[in-house]
Image (cartoon, rainbow, N blue to C red):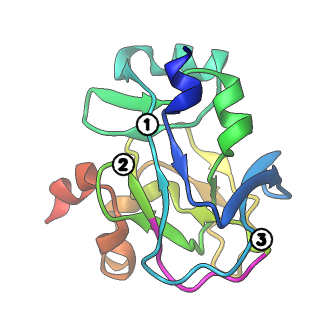
Amino acid sequence: MDLHKRWPHRWLNSKAKPGNSLIHRYGVFAKEDIKKDEPINVFGGIAVPKTEIEEYRKIISHAGIQVSDDFFIVPSNNEELIEQGIFNHSCEPNVGFNSSVTMIAIRNINAGEELVMNYAFMETYFEPFECNCGSSECRKTIDSNTWKDLDFQKKYGKFFSPYLKDKFY
């Protein structure tokens, strides 16, 4: 028996589904309305040391969660990304963390909306990139220092991963 098929590395709320995204190739979308604070995703995968994360990103993707200064939890293969979807970045997120690996709706989400998070909620290590979110709050260039901004922390800090919360609380 393939235990990964029976119990995959990730759990996705049945009200959500992967699909094609205008932000960046694949995304996750609400199939039906999702209420604020409702669990969206429990993230899992394999542990990759920070010293090897660039190699992983070249092979698979820039998907995953930084869980310490030294480690990331990432999908084990591209099939997981396609089957479970990728939570794209948005400067106006509707998904955030309530634990190390559980993501929740940070506001009510309507059916059809893409489920998006701000990558500053979970990571201190990535190359800057141009944002495609299209939000009126778009910062245009996304870098790994946004989480340090005090106004950003006040607005979204409670939705940061515990790894980042430990850095400023």
Residue drawn at (34%, 19%), measured in percent from left and top?
Answer: 49
Amino acid of disc 1: Gly
Are the residues flagged by discs 1 and 2 in contact, CB closer than 8 Å? yes
Q: Which residue is at the front of the view, 36 or 132?
A: 36
Q: What quarter of the picture does the N terminus occupy?
A: top right
Dot 1: what SS?
Answer: loop
Are the residues flagged by discs 2 and 3 in contact, CB closer than 8 Å? no
Percent x, y of residue 132: 76, 59
Residue drawn at (55%, 62%), measured in percent from left and top?
Answer: 117
Depth-wise, is mark 3 or mark 1 nearer the camera? 1
Sequence-first disc among 2 and 3: 2
Amino acid of disc 3: Gly
- Up/down of 139 relative to 80, above or below: below
Residue of label 1: 44
- In the picture provided, is 143 more to the left or to the right than 160? right
Mark 1 crowd level (few <14, some 14–19, many ≥20, 10 Å Cα): some
Q: Which residue is at the front of the view, 78 or 12?
A: 12
Q: Quadrant of residue 16?
A: bottom right
Residue of label 3: 134
Percent x, y of residue 70: 27, 26
- Up/down of 105 relative to 119, above or below: below
- In the picture provided, is 70 more to the left or to the right than 38? left
Which range of residues does the magenta coloring cover? 104-111
Sequence-first disc among 3 and 1: 1
As drawn, the label of residue 101 is 2
Dot 2: what SS?
Answer: loop
Amino acid of disc 2: Val
Residue drawn at (65%, 43%), measured in percent from left and top?
Answer: 84
Mark 3 crowd level (few <14, some 14–19, many ≥20, 10 Å Cα): some
Q: What quarter of the picture does the C terminus occupy?
A: bottom left
- In the picture provided, is 92 more to the left or to the right than 51? right
Q: Main secondary structure of the magenta part?
A: loop
